[in-house]
Every structure is written in C-alpha cells, then in structure tokens.
Image (tube, rainbow, N blue to C red):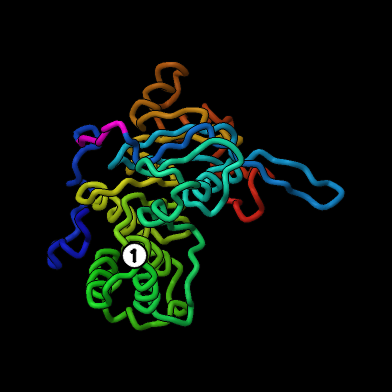
Amino acid sequence: MTTLLEQPKTEPMRPAAQAPSRTNRVLSDDGVPALLVDHVTKQFVVGGRRKRKQVMAVNDVTIRIRRGEIYGVLGANGSGKSTLIRLVSTLLTLDTGRVEVFGHDIERDEMAVKRVINRVSVDAAFFKKLSPFENLAYAARLYGMEPKAARAEAISILARLGIGEKRLSRPLEQMSRGMQQKVAIARALLTSPTLLLLDEPTTGLDPRSKLDVQTFIEELRDTHDATIVLTTHDLAEADRLCDRIGIINDGRIVVEDTPEALRAKVAEERGLEPTMESVFMTYTGRSLDDDLGDNEDKDDED
C-alpha cells in the first residue's frame, strides 16, 4: 500500500471541489470485503444494584463494506454507533455474530486485524505533557517503524492537516481541541492502516479545523488504498464524504444506501425535501441530537 511518505512533500492538498465524483470511482468487490459485520449483537448491564437491567446496544447488525469505500454510520446519541466501532476495533468482545477485516476474523486473528486497522475517537487519549511529535514517535515505536522514516512521515501528515513544524515541540496540553484531534488523526494514519475507523473525528472542531480534516479524509479516499468507516453527527459531512450511509436506531441498521439514493427515496416515497435531515427523521423519527440514554454503555454517549 502506498504510504503518505511516498507522496511528494511539495504536493498541495487538493480542494474538495476537484475530488473525483463518488459515482465515478471504482470500488473493489473481489469477494472479500474490507469489513464484514455479520449478525452482530452486544448487550450491556446498566443501572445500580437495585435497578440493573440489560440493554441491547447493537442488535443483529449486518454490514458489508467494500475495499476503498467510505461508509458512514449515522445515529442519535446512544443509538449504538460507537459501540459498533469499538466492537470492530476489538476494544469490546462480541456477544453473538462475527466480524471479519479483510478476511481475518477479529476473534481468531486478533493480532492480524490490529496490524491493519486504526481508530480515532472523539476523545483521543494522549500523553498531554509530551509534544505532538513525541506522541507520534511513541506510536511509531509500538508499530516497529524506523525512527527517521517515522519522523518524515509524521511531519508530512501533520503539515497536510495544517500543523507546521514549529508546533511539533509544544506540549499537547497547550494546544487547542482542534489541534489535538488533528494529532490523533495523524497518529492513526502514521501506520498506514488499510481500515481506518473514525468515530466522530470532527465533533467539537472549529470550522477551519473541520474543513482541514474533511479535506484530508477526501484525499485519503482518492489517493490511498484505505477503507474508512465514519461515524458523525454532521449530516452535511456524511453527505459530502460517504459512498454509502447506514442509519442506526435502537441498535439496528434501519436503512442503508448512497446519500443520493436515500435523498431521492424520501422525496419520491414521502414527498419530503430531498435532504439528509429528511432522511434521518424519516427512518428514526427523531432528531440527530436526541439522547437515547441507556441504549449504550455509560462511556458511549456519543
């Protein structure tokens, strides 16, 4: 797989308007999906000792994602989307069903899976006293990367995200939320994952930082051999970036299609405005900002 280090250092990031149309891109469908989620279920026990109850966070979810695709997962707070990402990334164990990443079962071939995936969450963990480069250098060592190559790669990725070399030595605790999230994305990309799990990567970012991240995701989609799963609260972001979208409600995928097809469907069948807002309300009956409370574990409120 081509790495970002192999791209010319002087090559500018292309504006989103110049990116190839989603409908003109050829996605691989050679029989082995990049990600297969097959009838997956996950329950949690919530509440105190007197009011403990089981809650179904992910309920019989099946998804098949092709190589090179950006697949968006939309859902209200507590709908199950972040639990789904944690299951795929092996941070949680499955109750039932199976998950395969490029043909590797995440339970039987866990180490093989971990070598080809990486995850960015809305609350990325860092060594806050260390600088961006020190955090990335630590991650590079964990993956056995050669220090000189890792440094060049880190500088290249951070520059494309709008973080210059002058900021590389500043402690992360002194940087803005937007800058810290960019560092989290750079850390994930440093190992050139073939499956990138982006869990609310632009939530809480200022408009400029959000645009930088979205443009970089488009660049990854168009120039690198990466498959991306994106959860987001931003309907416009999902519409812009995703080849297909699955809407999750009460732990179930209730509809799945391209953004264009989903908009056309609600316009034709329901007589509604062809917008992602209309799509979301039609298939969930609620606003994207609604909080479903106990439908996910306590740490999974987004």
Whether 37 is drawn above or below 180: the answer is: above
- Mark 1 = which residue? 186
**Picture coordinates of residue 292 (x, y %)?**
65, 42
Asked whether, in this view, residue 148 is left or right of residue 88, the answer is left
Whether 275 is drawn above or below 298: the answer is: above
What residue is rendered at 42% in x and 64% in y? 181
**Picture coordinates of residue 95 (x, y %)?**
61, 41
Asked whether, in this view, residue 283 is left or right of residue 258, the answer is right
Say which amino acid is labelled 1.
Answer: Ala
What residue is rendered at 47% in x and 18% in y? 270
Whether 59 is drawn above or below 197: the answer is: above
How many labels, in total?
Answer: 1
Query: What range of the chain is rendered magenta?
Result: 25-31
Q: Secondary structure at mark 1?
A: helix
Q: Is residue 152 visible?
A: yes
Q: Quadrant of residue 273?
A: top left
- Foreground residue, 279 or 256? 256
Q: Residues within 10 Å of mark 1 (few under 14, many from 20)?
A: many
Farthest right residue in view: 50
Asked whether, in this view, residue 237 is left or right of residue 156, the answer is right
Magenta residues: mostly which secondary structure?
loop
Farthest front residue in view: 108
Whether 145 is drawn above or below 67: the answer is: below
- Foreground residue, 101 or 174? 101
What residue is rendered at 57% in x and 43% in y? 94
**Picture coordinates of residue 263 (x, y %)?**
39, 27
**Picture coordinates of residue 72 (x, y %)?**
41, 41
Q: Is residue 286 visible?
A: no
Asked whether, in this view, residue 243 is left or right of residue 130, the answer is left
The verdict on residue 44 being magenta is no
What residue is rendered at 19% in x and 58% in y? 13
